[in-house]
Image: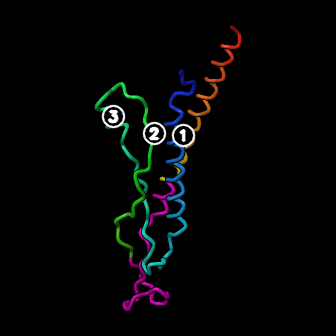
Amino acid sequence: MVELLPGVQSTASALTAERIRMDVIAQNIANINTTRGLDGKPYQRQRVVFQTILNQRLAADPGATPQPVRVARIEPDPRPPKLVYDPGHPDANAEGFVAFPDINLHQEMVDLIAASRAFEANLAVLKNARSMALQTLSIGKRT
């Protein structure tokens, strides 16, 4: 069978992976000042790790077909919380320091823009593949 939309599965999986990445970044931004979670500790920044199946397959077989993009895992960032002196804060320790998540808003925004652009690029690939498939079908109608 002829595949009219080659690479669509790969592009669709990339769209899903980038959406997950944007959701995680939004969660990080929303919790930038969360000093106490359900576990009683400050929020821990999360990051998305993608699988590298394509690189492994291309190294073994340069003619390999595109592989789907997958989120391998969402893991906590190992950076410790930053301590801010605020003795009046309800979560301050005995010395007056409050543990805040070590989240850099500027870094999160840059990551969000990168994920958004990657999402848009994959969406453009999907739209172009659809357009090419429709043109291919219209050529078949004429003959």
Q: Amino acid at mark 3?
A: Arg
Disc 1, SS? helix
Q: Identify residue type, mark 2.
A: Pro
Describe residue 113's horizontal placement relative to residue 54 as left or right. right
Q: CA distance from mark 3 to mark 1?
A: 19 Å
Q: Is residue 101 above or below residue 53?
A: below
Residue to which mark 3 is pinned: 57
Residue lying at the far right of the rendered structure: 142
Residue 140: percent from left, percent from top: 66, 13
**In the figure, is residue 72 to the left or right of 56?**
right
Which amino acid, by three-letter code, is at mark 1? Ala
Label 2 to label 1, Cα distance in Å?
A: 8 Å
Dots 2, 1 in contact, CB < 8 A: yes
For mark 2, give the secondary structure. Answer: loop
Q: Which residue is mark 2?
A: 68
Question: Looking at the image, which residue is at 53% across and 54% down?
Answer: 22
Q: Which residues are magenta?
A: 83-110
Write down the quadrant of residue 85 in the picture: bottom left
- Quadrant position of the C terminus in the picture: top right
Of the residues under marks 2 and 1, which one precedes in the sequence? 1
Q: Nearer the viewer, residue 19 or 99?
A: 19
> Does the segment drawn in magenta span residue 107?
yes
Residue found at the very far front of the displayed protein = 1
